[in-house]
Image (cartoon, coloured by chain):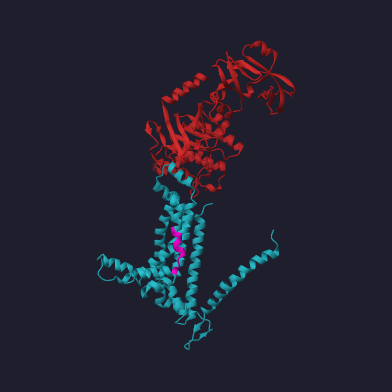
Amino acid sequence: MNTASHASADHAAADALLSIRKVEKRFAKRPVLCGISLDVASGEFLTVLGESGSGKTTLLRLIAGFEQLDGGEIWMAGERLDQTPAYRRQVNTVFQSYAIFPHLSVFDNVAYGLRAKAAPRGEIPTRVTQALAMVKMSDFAQSAPSRLSGGQQQRVALARALVNRPRVLLLDEPLSALDANLRRQMQVELKSLQREVGITFIFVTHDQEEAMALSDRIALLRAGRLEQVAEPREIYGYPATAYAAQFIGQTNLLRAEVRDGIATAGPIAWSSTGPSGAATFSLRPESIRLSSPSHAVNAADVTVHFRGRIKNQSFGGAMDLLEIDCGNSHLIRARIPSPGLLDGLQEFEFSAGDAVRVREGDAD
Amino acid sequence: MYSRAYKTAVTIPPLVWVTAFLLIPYAILFCYSFWSVSSLQVIVHNWNLQNYAQLFRNPLYLTVLLRSIRIAGAVTLLALLLGYPLAYYLSFHAAKRKDLLYQLVIIPLWASYLVRGYAWKTILGSDGVLNGFLQYLHITHRPVEFFLYSPFAVILTLTHIYTPFTFLPIYASLEHVPRNLVEASHDLGASPFSTFLRVILPLSLPGILAGATFAFVLTLGDFLAPLLVGGPSGIMISNIVVSLFGAAYNWPLGAAISLCMLLLVVTLLFATERLEKRFTIS
C-alpha cells in the first residue's frame, strides 16, 4: 500500500494538471494560507479536508479566481493561472449555496456558460439536454429554480458546471446542506459521475468520512498549512501527525518514551524501531483485540498485551466501543466486534506495528 | 391572539384618518367635477359631463398635459441615467467610501424643496451664476435667456430634486443581488460587462421600476418647479389646476382635471406594481 501511494504521488508530479506553488493569502494581515504547495493530476479526485477556518474554501476561491494571491503561483497545464481573470479560466465551481440564477429557468441556468463563451448555437440545446440527463434533471428543464428542492438545485449546479467541460471542477462543500440520506446518495453519484466524465475534481469538505469515501487523495489542511497529502488508506493507516490521526477517524494517542527499541506508555510497552526519546504513537481503536491464547502463541514477539478495567461499554451494533482504564489515568479506547457484555479486569492485545509513530503538531 | 377590542382599537384611527382626509375629499372632488359655474360666478349643482368634454376639446389642456408627461418622462430618464450608475458604483465598487457617499446622496433630501428651487433660479437667471460665468469666460456675450423660464429649467430642477428618490430603490435592489451570483457568472465565463447585462441588471429591475415610478409620478404632479423656473412655456398641468381653484375660480373644471390625473397615476402605480412583482424573485 505504501509503495503504491508513492508511485501515484510521482505520477501526480510528472503530469500535474494543476500546480499550486507556495501560495500565500492574508485577510487584513491575518494569514489564511501559509505557503501551500500541491500538485493535482489530470483526472484525479482530490479532497481538501479541514476544519472551518483552515483556509480550504480560500484555497478553492484562489483557484477559481475570486480572490487574488498574496504570494506564490498557480499553474494549469503549463500556463500561469493566477494572473488570468476568473471568467477566462477553464475551471468551474459548484458553490456551497448553489448560486443558481433565480431569474433563469433550469435550462437557461445550464446554458449560461455555453452562451457566455459563445458556443455554436446549434450545439447548446443538445449539450444542455445531455448535462441535465447526466444529473437526472431532464424533467425539470423548464422549471423555475425557486420550485426545486436543495438536492435538485445541487444537481442543476453540477450540470451547469460540467456542461462547460472544465479541466478542473471545484466543489465547495456541495453536499453540506443536504440531509444524511440524500448526502450519501449524492456521494455515490458524484464519484461515478467523476469516473464517467474524467474531469479533475477538487472537493472541499470538513467531513472526513466523505473525504475518505470519495477521494483518490486527501489534502489535510490545518490553519493554513498542509498537514498531510496522501491516499485515504495511507492517511488513515499511517497518519503523519497527531492532528491527522485525530482528525481522520478516531484514535488513541499514546505519549511514549522510546529507549533501546522499546516504547513505553504507562503500563503498556511495545517494540519500536524509531529513534529514542519522547514520541507519540497513534493506535486505532479497532486494532485492539480481546486477548486469546491462540494469538499469544502464534505471534508472541509482535503482539502487545495489556490489562485494563472496563470503564464504559457502549453498544454499537457490529462494533462495541470500550473505554479501558489501564491505571494511572491511562484511558484506551477500543472498538471490538460483538464482545458480549464485559466488565472488570480484562486482557487486551494489539500488534506492535499498529502503533504508528506520529509527529506532534505545533499547536497541540 | 389579539382580543377583538384591541383589533378595533388599532384599526379605527387609520380608518378615521383615511376617511376624513382621503375618501371624503375625493368624494367632494368627484361631485364637483360634474357641476358647473354660472355666469354669476356661482357653482351650480346641475349634474353634467361638460368639464370632461372641455378637457378633451380645449387644446390648451391637452397640450399642457402632454408637456407634463414629456417633462415627467425626461426627468425619469435623466434620474435613471444618473441614479443607476451612482447606485451601481456605491453597491459594487465603493468599498470603504460606501457609507460616506450614501450620506452625500441623502443630505440634499434634508434641504427644503423651495430652497433648491430658488437655488436653480439663482443659478439659471439672466443675472445668474451660470450666465455670469459663461460671460466671464467670453463663451457668451449676453445672458442666455432660455436657461431660466423654460421646460429645460423645469427638467433640470426636478431631475436634481428627484434623482435621490430614484437612487434609493435602485440601490436597495442592487444591495440585494447575491454576490455569489456575480461570482457564478464570472466562473461560467461571462465577462464583467456581460455579467452586468445578464445577472445584475435583470435582478435590479424591481428597483428600476420603483425608482422610475417615484420620479415620474412626483414630477407629473409637481407645480412648484414650473412656478419658480418654468415661465409660460414651462407650465405644467398642476399649475392649471392651481389657477382653476384660485384666480380662475372654476372648481368644477379643476376637479375634473385632478380626477383624470389621479386616474392616470393610480393606473400607472398598479401597472408598475404588477410588473415589479413579476420581476421580483423570492
User: In which quarter of the view is residue A20 placed?
Assistant: top left
In the displayed structure, A309 sits above or below B169; it is above
Mark count: 0
In the rendering, what colour is chain B? cyan
User: Residue B64 in magenta?
Assistant: no
User: Residue B109 in magenta?
Assistant: yes
Q: Residue A349's spot in the image, x, y percent?
A: 66, 18
Image quadrant occupied by the N terminus of chain B: bottom right
Residue in the picture at 40% in, 55% down = B85
Q: Is residue B135 left or right of residue B70?
A: left
Q: Nearer the viewer, residue A46 or A60?
A: A60
Q: Residue B23's spot in the image, x, y percent?
A: 57, 72
In the displayed structure, B177 sits above or below A306; it is below
> What secondary structure is the magenta-colored segment mainly?
helix
Residue in the picture at 49% in, 58% down = B275
Q: Nearer the viewer, residue B162 or A214?
A: B162
In the displayed structure, B90 sits above or below B227; it is above
**Magenta-highlighted residues:** B104-113
**Quick one: which chain is red?**
A
